[in-house]
Amino acid sequence: MSRSVELIVEGYVRLNDRDALHDILAHRQDLLRQLVSVTGVDPGKAIAQVNEEITIIEAGLATLAPD
């Protein structure tokens, strides 16, 4: 999935679409909060995946010029 996220982020960076990047970042952060509170199963792999995606999105945001 991370490659998919990388491609999406690259597209938004090329379009200079900071709002879209903030939206997907907020979605992944919300997903991470939900995964951390899961009980009864081990969400470790999913948490690692979402953390990796957040890192990719933040890197994309960092390449854009400040507002």
Image: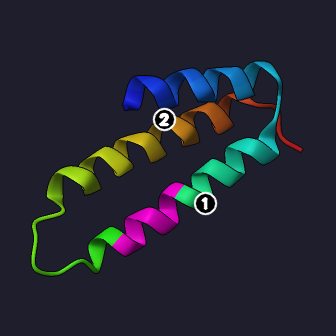
Query: What residue is shown at x 25% (from left), y 49% (from top)?
Result: 48
Q: Is residue 51 above or below residue 32?
A: above
Local crowd size for mark 2, using a 10 Å CA cut-off: few (<14), some (14–19), many (≥20) = many
Residue 36 part of the magenta-drawn span: no
Measured as percent of width and height from the top left, residue 53 is found at: 43, 41
Dot 1: what SS?
helix
The one of 1 and 17 positioned closer to us in this rendering? 1
Contact, mark 2 vs mark 1 (Cβ under 8 Å): no
Q: Is residue 67 above or below residue 47?
A: above
Amino acid identity at mark 2: Ile
Prevailing secondary structure of the magenta residues? helix
Could you tell me how far apart the alpha carbons at marks 2 and 1 are, in whole angstroms? 13 Å
User: Does residue 60 appear left or right of residue 15 in this picture?
Assistant: left
Query: What residue is shown at x 47% (from left), y 47% (from top)?
Result: 54
Q: Which residue is mark 1?
A: 26
Q: Earlier in the sequence, mark 2 or mark 1?
A: 1
User: Does residue 36 appear left or right of residue 22 in this picture?
Assistant: left
Q: Is residue 47 above or below residue 63?
A: below
Please provide the residue range marked out in magenta: 28-34
The one of 45 and 18 positioned closer to us in this rendering? 45
Q: Which residue is mark 2?
A: 56
